[in-house]
Image (cartoon, rainbow, N blue to C red):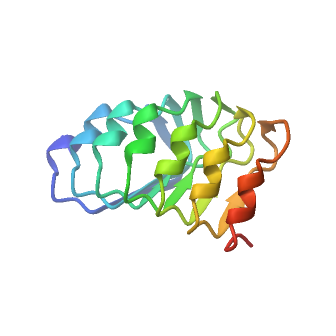
Amino acid sequence: EIGQTTTLVMLWLFNNGELEGGIPTEFGNLVNLESLAIFNTKVTGRIPSEIGFLQSLKIFKVENNLLSGALPNTLYDLASLEVLGIAGNRNITGSLSPRLGRLTKLRELYISETSIGGSLPEQIGELTELSYLSVTGTELSGPLPATIGNLSNVQ
């Protein structure tokens, strides 16, 4: 069982149209995981809240799948996270939490082609390491927060 492979550091599953089902909650047991990427598959369902147990996680990319629902609040507890990619999952909904500002090591944020709505939280300005921000094709609306001016590294 994958959840018992606690020494695993990197898990990338991609470009596989036969890969289906949800992200197993047992992934939360992979406490040494630094990189989890699942993209270009038929993976469905919600991102499990157990992802928040992965305190060593630096890269979390689940792009171009069939994921749905809101982002779990536990995602914002990943203090080591440097890359967050959920782009290309049209059925991911909700809004970005003000807790986004807790991800102070975040360098790249990809939420394009999702149904994320609302406005960018003011706390986005706390992501001073951010160098890439991709939000095209979302449901975001409203004015840009003034704090976005703090993102001097964004290209």
Counting from the top left corner in percent of width and height, residue 10 is at: 32, 62
What residue sits 44% from the left and 41% below the top? 75
Quarter of the figure with the N terminus: top left
- Residue 43 spot, x, y in % from top left: 51, 37
Please give the name of the residue rendered at 52% of the width and 31% of the height, measured from the top-left corner.
Answer: 44
Where is 130 relative to 18, above or below? below
In the image, residue 82 sits, relative to residue 138, either above or below, namely below
Q: 49 or 8, which is in the foreground?
A: 49
Q: Is residue 84 left or right of residue 64?
A: left
* Image position, residue 36 (x, y; %): 40, 55
Is there any visible trace of residue 17 in the rendered image? no
Query: For the point 74% across and 73% down, which residue is it?
Result: 155
Q: Is residue 110 left or right of residue 36?
A: right
- Rendering quarter of residue 149: bottom right
Q: Please tell me which residue is depicted at 61% across the width and 47% down the height of the picture.
A: 123
In the drawing, does residue 76 fall left or right of residue 101?
left
